[in-house]
Amino acid sequence: QVQLVESGGGLVQAGGSLRLACAASLRTFSTYTMGWFRQAPGKEREFVAAYRNSWSASNTLYADSVKGRFTIDRDNAKDTVYLQMNSLIPEDTAVYYCAFRPRWLVAGHIRESDFDSWGQGTQVTVSS
């Protein structure tokens, strides 16, 4: 398993921005997917975004609810994946988790079971 350490959550007003970070040593993996999920109180954990990497390509996937507002990217030098969240709305309030799988993720209905390792979660609260 890969150890994932998240940071960057907090309280922000609607319309504001936050950047989450997930530190993960992935240098031994040429193909992998890093994902972000979130879980609001009383709701199931849902997919937010993913960064897919292989020896020949890398790209991103987003849930429709965050497309155009959130951006996932990776800083290889820092072994960190970021989730930049802009134009936040109260409905974005949740515990955010990063996740890892040592394989390319096929786009479609993305589930928790698609990932092998998880971070501890970080709280994001958006006030109205």
Image: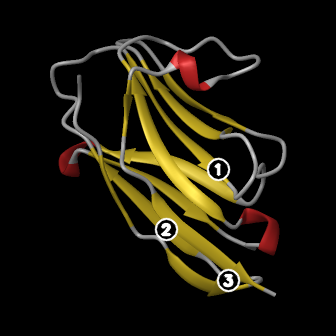
Q: Earlier in the sequence, mark 1 or mark 3?
A: 3
Colour scheme of the rendered structure: secondary structure
Residue located at (43% from left, 54% from top): 121
**Residue 92 location (% of width, % of height):** 73, 64
**Residue 91 location (% of width, % of height):** 81, 65
Placement of 2 over or under 119, stated as above or below: above
Q: Secondary structure at mark 3?
A: loop
Q: Quadrant of residue 124?
A: bottom right
Q: Are marks 1 and 2 in contact (CB under 8 Å)?
A: no
Looking at this view, name the residue that lies furthest to the front.
Answer: 42
Residue located at (54% from left, 48% from top): 72
Q: Earlier in the sequence, mark 1 or mark 2?
A: 2
Q: Which mark is residue 99?
A: none
Q: Please give left or right for residue 21 compared with residue 62 in the image.
A: left
Q: Secondary structure at mark 1?
A: strand
Q: Amino acid at mark 1?
A: Gln
Q: Please give left or right for residue 88 compared with residue 101 in the image.
A: right
The 10 Å Cα crowd at callout 2, few under 14, some 14 to 19, many 20 or more, is some
State which mark lies toward you, 1 or 2. Answer: 1
Placement of 33 over or under 40, stated as above or below: above
> Which image quarter holds the C terminus?
bottom right
The 10 Å Cα crowd at callout 1, few under 14, some 14 to 19, many 20 or more, is some
Residue labelled with disc 1:
39
Residue labelled with disc 2:
19
Residue in the foreground of this view, choosing between 100 and 28: 100
The Cα atoms of the two marked residues, 2 and 3, are separated by 11 Å
**Residue 81 location (% of width, % of height):** 38, 47
Q: Are marks 2 and 3 in contact (CB under 8 Å)?
A: no
